[in-house]
């Protein structure tokens, strides 16, 4: 760093401050006003052995300048003797005014010892001197100080019987210039008094010497006591140093010191365990040789800033805490935390750095893992929120589709419909069915699609789909099936698992426009606690592992965060709905499994799906039962808040012989049911309604009739948030959008 710190903590002797105390009393000015902005007290100002900072002295002078007239100050200092007590005694013996002026105010005079001034003296002639005063370093000059010096220059000859000197003061930016003219002729009284002055001076000096002798004897005794104390302090220091050395030798953190150029001057033995260097090797290695160039620049700039901040106003509690990556002796890198502060001499000047370094690699890795977990949690929460949103849209959309598809069926069954109208209605129904398929995908993503799980072997399912997958792939894509022999049995909806496989294969095909290799693998895996601790997206257990990988274009890191969100796609407009992977995600979640993706741009993609295995053996779907007659004559209570769906259901049921009672919400339905419970054969009850939901209505109806015949209707599946009670209690449900035939068949089955 090679930075020399300037010592601007200049101090001023307090031996002259008693003059300000005296001025305060003489001018009836409270001393507190004169010392405002400083920490000075009366006792400190009267203690001639103390020193104060130049900053406090200039603040004091500025206060004096504002509160006391300059003429008063000048008169005061013309006759003041306190600053130069010994000078007055010597003056009686020397009698050379030039020497007195130079002794007091010259280049190495008393004034330069009291104040941070640089002085040059020019001798014009025998009675004419010019003193040029400038402040040292970058300190600010003080007007009051210059006025005080002006008064003392004028009054110095008077102390020795000479007339007042004539002094012209010119203030400059950094100080002042004093042009001094003095007379060499004393008055008559002074000459008569010469002998007395000699005698008085000799006696005074004798008394001074005697007093000095007594003081020396006293000081010698005090010195002996101080020597004893110093020896005791040295003994304690040696013991303390030994204790600190013992601590430094045994602590795991590195204790170190450097000079201001960051060359090590001490390293504790623990450096070998942390960085691989012995203390001797480390002392020959600059600190900045252990760090990267960009880290070195950052560290140097930081220390420079701290050095300039605390160099002149040290804060003993201030320290710097930094985290750095350093290189060990073997070339590996670790993260360390350093706490450092400046070492200072007795004047507060910084001469080095002392610090402690700790290996925080494990803590740093734990922090990265924590942030990764937080990111995964945020993704999970976002996916849940999107799922709830998608499920809500699908539910509302299903109500619309009930009306669209139902009225389309009714229209197509009308006699006398023109071929053109029949064609138009057919197109409307086809569009509605496509919309219904899209809605089912949203429900699948939101985990609200009804599934029919059964024990299946995924290998058997892949074998059945193999020909279809081959037909979906162009000739330039090679297929590689690697199916393990014993992968166990899973409880799953076969159609949903087929959809997972087809969607992933189509995605892989689109990612390899120029051809490539598609690999489908299965295996049985057991995930233990160690694996879960390293892969937060997983859970413990035994799973069937399905892997679909390709060597295509891959997925960017930015896209990976969103690939399972519905309607998110990186394909050009018109080439994808953005629901393929969202559906895969929903199916896996609904089957209590988990999915993970490894991919990089240009490096292909690897989708891993884990589904829990069970002990049961695979079985085949049971054949469907043919529908019964769709007509009836019973009374049905229709409870539906959506007006379009309610009107359609009423029309379908009425057209097939049923008597229908309508209710738009739960409270209205309960009023009707209470009045005609005995005559109502079945209640077609919507699950999600305002005021009261379907479950609440059902419970209230049971208070009227313990065994009501109820068919629930909902755009959600039994596993949805709003309809989970249906699956738990095995209640009857018809999912929207339903066709007239589906509605009539299910009602007839319940009534029969």
Image: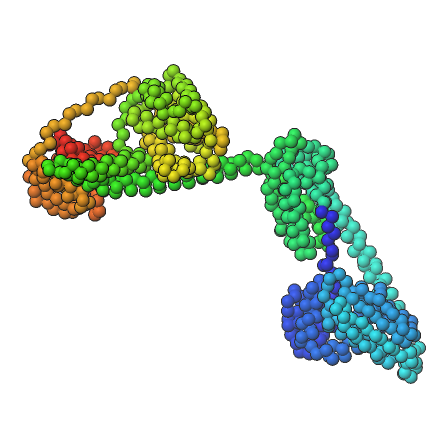
| Residue 550 in view of the camera | yes
Along the line of sight, the residue nearer the viewer: 599 or 150: 599
User: Which residue is at 66% across, 37% downward?
Assistant: 290
Along the line of sight, the residue nearer the viewer: 164 or 623: 623
Residue 534 shown left or right of residue 435 in the figure = right
User: Which residue is at 20% across, 22% downward?
Assistant: 623
Along the line of sight, the residue nearer the viewer: 404 or 484: 404
Residue 528 shown left or right of residue 742 in the figure = right
| Residue 670 in view of the camera | no
Residue 410 shown left or right of residue 293 in the figure = left
Q: Residue furthest top?
A: 485
Colour scheme in use = rainbow
Q: Residue furthest bottom?
A: 188
User: Which residue is at 30% across, 21% downward?
Assistant: 456
Q: Position of residue 554 (x, y in %)?
A: 46, 31
Q: Residue 73: name its quadrant.
A: bottom right
User: Which residue is at 73% across, 69% downward?
Assistant: 142
235 in relation to 279, above or below: below
């Amino acid at each position: 760093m090679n930075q020399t710190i300037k010592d601007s903590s200049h101090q001023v002797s307090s031996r002259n401050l008693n003059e300000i105390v005296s001025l305060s009393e003489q001018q009836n000015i409270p001393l507190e006003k004169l010392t405002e902005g400083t920490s000075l007290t009366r006792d400190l100002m009267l203690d001639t052995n103390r020193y104060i900072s130049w900053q406090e002295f200039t603040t004091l002078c500025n206060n004096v300048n504002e509160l006391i007239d300059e003429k008063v100050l000048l008169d005061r200092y013309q006759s003041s003797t306190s600053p130069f007590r010994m000078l007055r005694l010597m003056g009686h013996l020397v009698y050379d005014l030039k020497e007195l002026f130079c002794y007091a105010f010259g280049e190495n005079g008393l004034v330069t010892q009291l104040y941070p001034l640089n002085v040059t003296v020019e001798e014009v002639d025998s009675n004419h001197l010019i003193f040029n005063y400038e402040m040292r370093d970058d300190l600010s000059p003080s007007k009051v100080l210059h006025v005080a010096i002006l008064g003392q220059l004028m009054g110095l000859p008077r102390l020795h019987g000479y007339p007042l000197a004539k002094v012209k003061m010119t203030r400059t930016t950094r100080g002042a210039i004093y042009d001094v003219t003095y007379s060499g002729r004393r008055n008559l009284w002074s000459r008569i008094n010469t002998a007395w002055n000699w005698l008085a001076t000799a006696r005074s000096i004798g008394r001074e010497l005697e007093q000095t002798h007594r003081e020396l004897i006293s000081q010698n005794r005090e010195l002996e006591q101080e020597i004893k104390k110093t020896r005791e302090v040295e003994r304690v220091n040696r013991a303390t140093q030994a204790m600190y050395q013992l601590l430094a030798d045994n602590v795991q953190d590195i204790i170190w010191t450097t000079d201001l150029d960051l060359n090590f001057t001490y390293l504790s033995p623990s450096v070998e365990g942390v960085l691989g260097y012995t203390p001797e090797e480390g002392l020959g290695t600059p600190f900045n040789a252990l760090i990267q160039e960009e880290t070195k620049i950052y560290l140097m700039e930081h220390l420079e800033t701290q050095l300039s901040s605390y160099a002149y106003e040290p804060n003993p509690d201030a320290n710097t805490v930094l985290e750095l990556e350093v290189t060990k002796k073997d070339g590996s890198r670790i993260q360390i935390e350093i706490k450092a502060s400046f070492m200072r001499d007795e004047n507060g000047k910084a001469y080095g750095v002392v610090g402690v370094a700790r290996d925080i690699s494990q803590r740093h890795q734990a922090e990265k893992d924590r942030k990764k977990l937080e990111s995964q949690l945020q993704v999970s929460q976002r996916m849940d929120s999107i799922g709830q949103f998608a499920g809500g849209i699908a539910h509302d959309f299903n109500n619309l589709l009930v009306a669209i598809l139902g009225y389309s069926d009714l229209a197509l069954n009308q006699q006398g419909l023109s071929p053109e109208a029949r064609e138009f209605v057919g197109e409307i129904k086809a569009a509605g069915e496509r919309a219904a398929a899209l809605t089912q995908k949203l429900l699948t993503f939101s985990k609200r699609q009804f599934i029919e799980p059964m024990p299946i072997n995924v290998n058997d399912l892949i074998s059945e789909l193999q020909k279809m997958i081959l037909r979906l792939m162009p000739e330039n894509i090679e297929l590689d099936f690697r199916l393990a022999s014993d992968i166990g049995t899973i409880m799953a909806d076969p159609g949903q698992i087929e959809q997972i496989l087809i969607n992933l294969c189509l995605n892989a095909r689109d990612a390899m426009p120029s051809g490539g290799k598609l690999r489908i693998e299965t295996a049985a895996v057991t995930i233990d606690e160690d694996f879960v601790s390293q892969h937060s997206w997983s859970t413990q257990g035994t799973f069937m592992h399905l892997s679909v990988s390709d060597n295509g274009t891959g997925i960017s890191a930015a896209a990976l965060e969103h690939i399972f969100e519905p309607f998110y796609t990186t394909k050009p407009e018109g080439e994808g709905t953005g629901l393929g992977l969202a559906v895969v995600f929903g199916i896996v979640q609904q089957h209590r499994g988990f999915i993970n993706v490894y991919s990089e741009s240009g490096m292909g993609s690897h989708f891993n799906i884990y589904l829990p295995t069970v002990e049961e053996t695979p079985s085949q779907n049971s054949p469907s039962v043919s529908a019964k007659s769709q007509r009836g004559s019973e009374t049905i209570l229709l409870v539906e808040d959506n007006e379009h769906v309610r009107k359609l259901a009423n029309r379908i049921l009425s057209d097939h012989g049923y008597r229908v009672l309508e209710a738009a919400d739960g409270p209205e339905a309960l009023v009707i049911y209470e009045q005609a419970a005995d005559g109502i054969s079945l209640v077609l009850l919507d699950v999600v309604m305002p005021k009261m939901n379907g479950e609440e209505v059902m419970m209230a109806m049971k208070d009227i009739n313990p065994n009501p015949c109820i068919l629930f209707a909902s755009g959600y599946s039994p596993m949805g948030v709003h309809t989970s009670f249906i699956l738990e209690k095995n209640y009857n449900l018809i999912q929207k959008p339903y066709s007239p035939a589906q509605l009539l068949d299910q009602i007839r089955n319940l009534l029969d």
